[in-house]
Image (cartoon, helix red, strand yellow):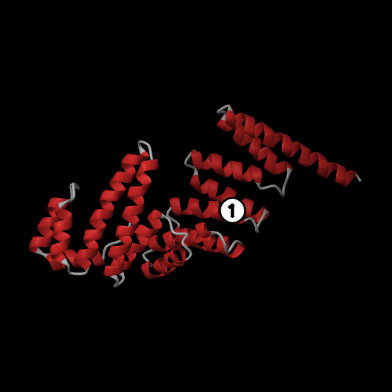
Amino acid sequence: MVALALVASSLYISERYIQSQQQLAAAGDIEGAMEAANSAARFDPFATEPLQTQAAILQSQGRNPEAERAWQQAIQREPNDFLLYLSLGDLQMAMGKFEAAEENFREVRRLNPMASAATRSIAQSLVRRGNLEEAGAEYEKLLESEEIDTLGLYDLGRILVRTGEPGRGYEIINQSRRRAENELETLEEPIRSQQEDLIESMKLAAADALVASRNYNAAYEQISESDSEQAPALLELISTDPEGYRQSVVNSEIY
């Protein structure tokens, strides 16, 4: 009975610290919120919420290695929570730890096969590591299930251009551009301007696909209509060294 009472007391104290952490964070007292989260984690060795709070605060302060450890500790407490692996993987992507991120995204998919975010993130981690064909296969799964987003579609198109299917890549890049244009109506500044820049990049990527297909005249015509600062140099390259341009496209990275 005494042991049960001690456990109940510890859980109660932990909950009070969690409430305190939330109040302090809302008031902008990040240091106090961090201390409260640390105390909550000590009093309840099973709860993940205090550790998630720690990780979020540490990330906001740019202390990513410490945040990574907090997410890992949370996973040790609740190894079946796929959202914890997803958060850890996202952080590791930002840290440039793409292989580790991929492992965590695959664990997300193992725990929740319906999580399309996991497949999307696996594809992105593979792209970052230069495994374009494997990344393309992951994006194809999303395309088949109609769960691929605009950026995923754009990535897939550019991957196809670089892996021997420039014609299909051209079609998919243009499909992603049409989606992005349709999305403009719902966006406000500054996101709208960013989307407009993305659309301009998509137009040039479509021209790259034409170059990869050795359709140089069509590529020249498309680039001529672009307002991009890169356009004059690209037009000069098509005119003077089209095959060199093609090789630079095929061998270039996505990001």
Residue occupying image coordinates x 82% and y 44%: 7
- In this view, the residue in front, 221 or 20, is 221
Q: Quadrant of residue 249?
A: bottom left
Question: Residue furthest toward the right?
Answer: 1
The residue that label 1 is drawn on is 83
Vertical comparison of 185 with 224: above or below:
above
Residue nearest the viewer, comparing 150 with 33:
150
Question: Residue visible at 33% across and 58% down?
Answer: 175
Q: Residue drawn at (18%, 46%), measured in percent from left and top?
A: 227
Percent position of residue 65, x then y: 51, 48
Asked if one can make out residue 173 in the rendered structure from this viewpoint, the answer is yes
Tell me which corner region of the image, top left, top right, bottom left or bottom right, holds residue 44: top right
Q: Mark 1: few, some, or many residues within 10 Å (few <14, many ≥20)?
A: some
Asked whether 249 or 217 is in front, the reply is 217
Amino acid on which disc 1 is placed: Leu
Q: Which percent across, then down, holds residue 164?
A: 29, 72
Observer-nearest residue: 190 or 110? 190
